[in-house]
Amino acid sequence: MITRSWTFLVVAGIFEVVWAIGLKYSQGFTSVGATALTLAALIASFYLLARSLETIPVGTAYAVWTGIGAVGTAVLGIMLFGEPRHLARLACILIVVIGIIGLKVTAAR
């Protein structure tokens, strides 16, 4: 069952992807619009991560949050910026996804 804290955590991870990709579009914080979006996503991400910590252990929450951010950013890097999509790289992304799922499953115990 997905609890409110887990929903906060997943959405926090999505906002992490937004601010990480926003860093690229902000062009070193010289693009005002992209910078504003990046900072807003950063604040939302940290706020929701903090809210998820009300019931999820910090080690689990932080690992899942960074995992969602890493996977989402890597996938969007491939899609938006033409980053390499070598089989080994895709396999490593899959390993992170498996780790995220494993943390969720074992956190319920």
Image (cartoon, rainbow, N blue to C red):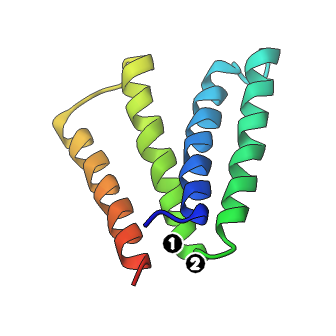
Residue 17 in picture, x, y percent from top left: 55, 38
Q: Provide the residue designation for mark 2.
A: 57
Which x, y percent locates residue 30? 79, 17
Secondary structure of residue under mark 1 = helix
Quarter of the rendering containing residue 9? bottom right
Position of residue 7 relative to residue 1, above or below, is above
Q: Residue at x 55, y 75 (%)?
A: 59
Q: Is residue 100 left or right of residue 53?
A: left
Q: Quadrant of the N terminus?
A: bottom left
Whole-number angstrom distance, CA of label 2 to CA of label 1: 5 Å
Residue 49 found in image quarter? bottom right
Which element type, helix, strand or loop, lies under badge 2? loop
Q: Badge 2 local density, few (<14 within 10 Å), some, or many (20+)?
A: few
Q: Residue at x 72, y 31 (%)?
A: 38
| Vertical relation: 8 (above or below) 107 | above
Question: Residue 50's spot in the image, x, y percent?
Answer: 72, 63
Q: Is 72 in front, or is 30?
A: 72
> At 44% from the left edge and 77% from the top edge, which residue is drawn?
107
Image quadrant in which the C terminus is located: bottom left
The residue drawn where x is 35% and y is 72% is: 105
- Viewed as shown, does residue 20 lie left or right of 81? right
Q: Position of residue 46 (x, y in %)?
A: 72, 53
The residue nearer to you, when weighing 97 against 53, is 53
Callout 1 crowding tier (Cα within 10 Å): few <14, some 14–19, many ≥20 = some
**Which residue extends farthest left?**
87
What amino acid is found at the position of numbered circle 2 in the picture? Pro
Instruction: Give the labeled residue for mark 1.
Output: 60
Report the front residue among 83 and 6.
6
- The amino acid type of the residue labelled 1 equals Thr
Q: Is residue 73 above or below residue 95?
A: above
- 59 displayed left or right of 80: right
Task: Evaluate if marks 2 and 1 touch, with contact meaning CB atoms under 8 Å apart.
Answer: yes
